[in-house]
Image (cartoon, grey):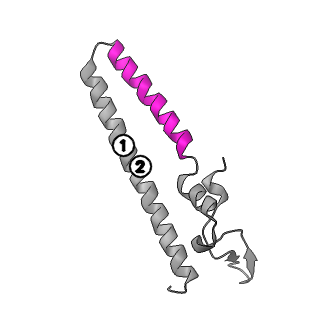
Amino acid sequence: MFSQATLRLGPGYRVCRNCGTRFPDGSREWPDLTESQKKQFLYGDLPAVGVIGVVLVAVFIYAAVKMRDVKIAFVLLGIFIALGAVILGIFYLMCWLNIRRSERRRWGQF
């Protein structure tokens, strides 16, 4: 699976600050991406991150249960779920803002 880093949203060029020359940078606008590229941009490395998160939660909960403190296990589980939801929410908010900016650029609304 390819990383999200291989896809960049943009007009397809960058402008040199020194001379003002345009050069291609490989970026593409959201409406120009294929369905699979859109999925790659939105989901990218999410499965791998999810697996790592589940393993970390399992280790901490196992340690808490091993210490015979079930309350700590539930508190840790709640913290991990809340933190994961916040991080995921911020990630998708940033994706949405980038997609919106790309569509506006593409349709000349900037």
Q: Does the magenta stretch include residue 63?
A: yes
Q: Is mark 2 on a helix, strand or loop?
A: helix
Q: Magenta segment, which residues?
A: 46-66
Query: Outermost residue, left direction?
Result: 71
Quarter of the image where one finds residue 64: top left
Q: What element carries label 1?
A: helix
Dominant SS in magenta: helix
Image coordinates of residue 89 in percent, x first then y, are: 39, 54
Amino acid marked by disc 1: Leu
Do residues under tags 2 and 1 come within 8 Å of each other at their CB atoms? Answer: yes
Marking on residue 87: 2
Classify 10 Å Cα crowding around label 2: few (below 14), some (14-19), many (20 and above): few
Classify 10 Å Cα crowding around label 1: few (below 14), some (14-19), many (20 and above): few
Cα–Cα gap, marks 2 and 1: 6 Å
Residue at (55%, 87%) from the top-left corner? 108
Amino acid marked by disc 2: Ile
Q: Is residue 40 above or below residue 54?
A: below
Image coordinates of residue 23 in percent, x first then y, are: 75, 76
Q: Is residue 107 above or below residue 79?
A: below
Quarter of the image where one finds residue 106: bottom right
Image coordinates of residue 62 in percent, x first then y, are: 39, 19
Residue at (54%, 52%) from the top-left corner? 43
Marking on residue 2: none
Q: On the picture, is 69 further left or further right than 5? A: left
Q: On the picture, is 59 further left or further right than 75? A: right
Image coordinates of residue 8 in percent, x first then y, are: 62, 64
Q: Which of 18 and 43 is in front in this view?
A: 43
Q: Is residue 96 magenta?
A: no
Which residue is tagged 1? 83
Quarter of the image where one finds residue 24: bottom right
Residue at (32%, 36%) from the top-left corner? 79
Q: Is residue 33 above or below residue 74?
A: below
